[in-house]
Image: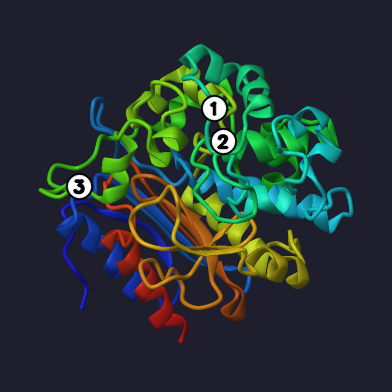
Amino acid sequence: MAVDAPVEIHGTVAAGFEPVADAFAANFAHHAEVGAACAVRVGGDQVVDLWAGVADPATGRAYEADTLQLVFSSTKGIVSTAAHLLAQRGELDLDAPVADVWPEFAANGKEAITVRWLLGHRSGVIGIDRVLSIDELLAWDPFIEALAAAPPLWEPGTAHGYHAISFGHLVGEVIQRVTGTDIGTFVREEVAAPVGAEFHIGIGEADLPRVAPLLDFAPGSIGEEPDPTIAAIFTPGSHTNRAFMIAPVLPTTFNQAEVLRARIPAANGCTSARSLARIYGALVSEVDGVRLLSRAQVDDARAVQSEGEDLVMRSGPTRLGSGFFLSDPGDPMLGEGSFGHAGLGGSLGCALPEREIGFAYVMNQMSAQVKGDPRSRGLLDAVLACTA
């Protein structure tokens, strides 16, 4: 039965995928959605392309099919795709030491850390010994130099903890050392463009007006008992605090033009649901004749590297491949075998090779629920029911 929504739903769904449209409408009716989009590809074909609501409540600008949305850590999945693309080409050995391509990184006991340990959040290099200014974070080199000099916060390879901010600069610098190209350009030209997608890590001036500003956490989304990870972020000295509070920024700081223009490849990617689904669809099938990663490379990416207690994320155990989160009881995504990456506030890109599904959901209204956001969960359940 179709669900009435307080906004007009735009876009298309293929026959048999109407329940996804119902779930999308339900997010506006029951989960305080403001502006959002959802796209799904199956076997390379677009089967869902939906958008609705308001992109910018301050101006009343409508959410459109090509609205760009900052997706926070969903950016990490695209950076990881870039690393696997280089591995597939034989240009990057994921099991070789980082110091082979970035010699300065060997300082302070990091000489044995491999690229795969970076991707699997096992390096221990989650923070540095000081807080960067915002200008330093936006400049790239100060953070790179601090990471190269930093000691790991646990013995590398022995445990895992989410590299909340450092991940993007660590993997991004490896990619830059291998290719001579900055991570934003490489993603734009080698990951997104071949499949007709947009993904900006460092957005150009001309595209800034298309970005939907993030809206602070929805009233009531934190609740009386805040998510343990959110609470730990503000606990001085904790691994969570060290990993997230690299610079004095809040989530809505990322709406500022200078932050959007910078390269922060753990957190400031801007894309649309349509584009994100194209990329994930092209990881598991051909999209317009292009497949980004082979099945063998995808299997390498989703092989378990880290599982169990996460020294940074305090919302339950995590399960990680090489750069992607894997299905777990708290966040099953598309079920066993699926892989992807969510972003703070609720965005999600993921794929399931066995059904050749590429899924994307983006939104501007942030939720403080780190795992199991009911908005994406309802959409994913509908997709699975339609592809059973």
Can residue 194 be spotted in the picture?
A: no
Image quadrant holding the N terminus, namely bottom left
Q: Are marks 3 and 1 in contact (CB under 8 Å)?
A: no
Mark 2 residue type: Ser
Q: Are marks 2 and 1 in contact (CB under 8 Å)?
A: yes
Q: Earlier in the sequence, mark 3 or mark 2?
A: 2
Rendered residue at 25%/61% (across/down): 25
Can you identify the residue that label 1 sits on? Answer: 128
Q: Is residue 225 left or right of residue 155?
A: left
Q: Is residue 74 left or right of residue 297?
A: left
Can you identify the residue that label 3 sits on? Answer: 226
Whole-percent x, y for residue 180 in the image: 83, 30
Q: Tag 2: Cα neighbours inside 10 Å, few (<14), some, or many (≥20)?
A: many
Can you identify the residue that label 2 sits on? Answer: 166
Residue 38, above or below 187: below
Look at the numbered disc 2 and give the secondary structure of its residue: helix
Look at the numbered disc 3 and give the secondary structure of its residue: loop
Give the distance between the C-alpha atoms of the residues marked 2 and 1, in whole angstroms.
9 Å
Whole-percent x, y for residue 232 in the image: 31, 41
Q: Nearer the viewer, mark 3 or mark 1?
A: 1
Rendered residue at 75%/38% (across/down): 174
Mark 1 residue type: Ile
Q: Earlier in the sequence, mark 3 or mark 1?
A: 1
Q: Earlier in the sequence, mark 2 or mark 1?
A: 1
